[in-house]
Image (cartoon, helix red, strand yellow):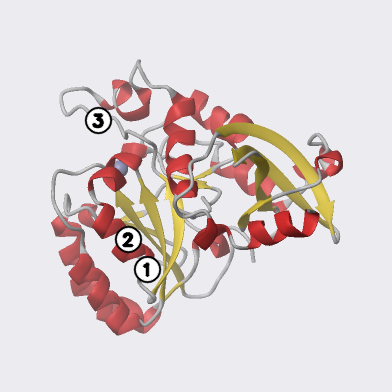
Amino acid sequence: MLRVILSLALCWLPLFAIEHIEHYEVFVKQYQENNTFFLVSRRLKLSGVTFYLTTNTQTLQTKVLSLDASKLMPLDENFAKTPFAKQLSDATSLHVKGGATHATTQNDKAIYLTMDLCPSQKKGYESEFIEHLTKQNGKTPIAIAISSAWKEHHEKEFETLLHNPLLEITWVNHTHTHFYDRNLPDRENFMLHVNTNVKSEILGVEKKLLEVGITPSVFFRFPGLIADEKLMRELRETYFLIPLGANAWVAKNEPIKTGSFILIHGNKNEPQGIEMLEKKLPEVLKTYRFKPIQEAFVQ
Ligand SMILES: [Zn+2]
């Protein structure tokens, strides 16, 4: 039986692509394997079997696994000493720009591309840009911040992105509804809106991704990059997600430098940013290399 369960876990994508998750909840423990600490941050039930969302605290890679529950321990000082805990603590210490805005590692010439998929009435996505990017750069690591509200109305576009062999995608939590009201000031808008249900905003999109076989990453992007101390504390102490800000929001003309988190919108709501990056791309690629977002935090 154990072998059957383990092999199911290894085939997360094809087997569970049309499954419905019965239970999904925050569940925080740690366990050790080959001298590495793993964080368990969620628990889910599928066809009566319990699985866990786990994070390797050295590499920041996540996996959905079936685990022996008796090996799961409460977090202790060993967790606090891990690279993941340190990066989580640093990235959530300032709320002003919505989290980490650039790499903390010293990867020579590395830059990090992030693309937001906020809800949008527009059909399609920036497919031409993605085509030009991968034509020039080959297989490209990209962190895609996705909201359930975008995915719900763009299933075809989502599938195309997911199956693009030239993209190496890290899926970033960009909340379930991504609330925004153009008439409200920032301090009452996005996740700071009085009716925000933080739990359903964060778990909702993770569940949607898991149901199509995608493992959510440890990264989170605040809608509008708008946060406060309380939300940062919740990311750190309850949800264990590293918030990604940006220091190179292309449409705002912020320059790309070594270690930059580049921000563009893939939902067609900010075509000027796409145009500007497309123009800069040949020059950027002479100097820099796109790297997976995990490498911005751990070597
Ligand atoms: Zn957004």
Q: Residue placed at 71% from the left, 54% from the top?
A: 5
Q: Residue placed at 73% from the left, 58% from the top?
A: 4
Q: Amino acid at mark 3?
A: Tyr
How dense is the environment of label 1, judged by Cα within 10 Å: few (below 14), some, or many (20 and up)? few
Relative depth, front residue between 19 and 172? 19
User: What residue is shown with label 1?
Assistant: 163
Determine if the C-beta at disc 3 is less than 8 A from ligand 1. Answer: yes
Residues at marks 1 and 2, CA–CA distance in whole angstroms: 6 Å
Question: Does residue 130 lie above or below 155 as drawn?
Answer: below
Q: Residue placed at 54% from the left, 58% from the top?
A: 15
Residues at marks 2 and 3, CA–CA distance in whole angstroms: 25 Å
**Would you say 151 lies left or right of 231 here?**
left
Q: Are marks 1 and 2 in contact (CB under 8 Å)?
A: yes
User: What residue is shown with label 3?
Assistant: 180
User: Helix or strand or loop: what does disc 3 sit on?
Assistant: loop
User: What residue is shown with label 2?
Assistant: 159
Question: Does residue 187 lie above or below 106 as drawn?
Answer: above
Q: Quadrant of ligand 1?
A: top left
Q: Which mark is residue 71?
A: none
Residue pushed farthest top? 194
Relative depth, front residue between 79 and 44? 44
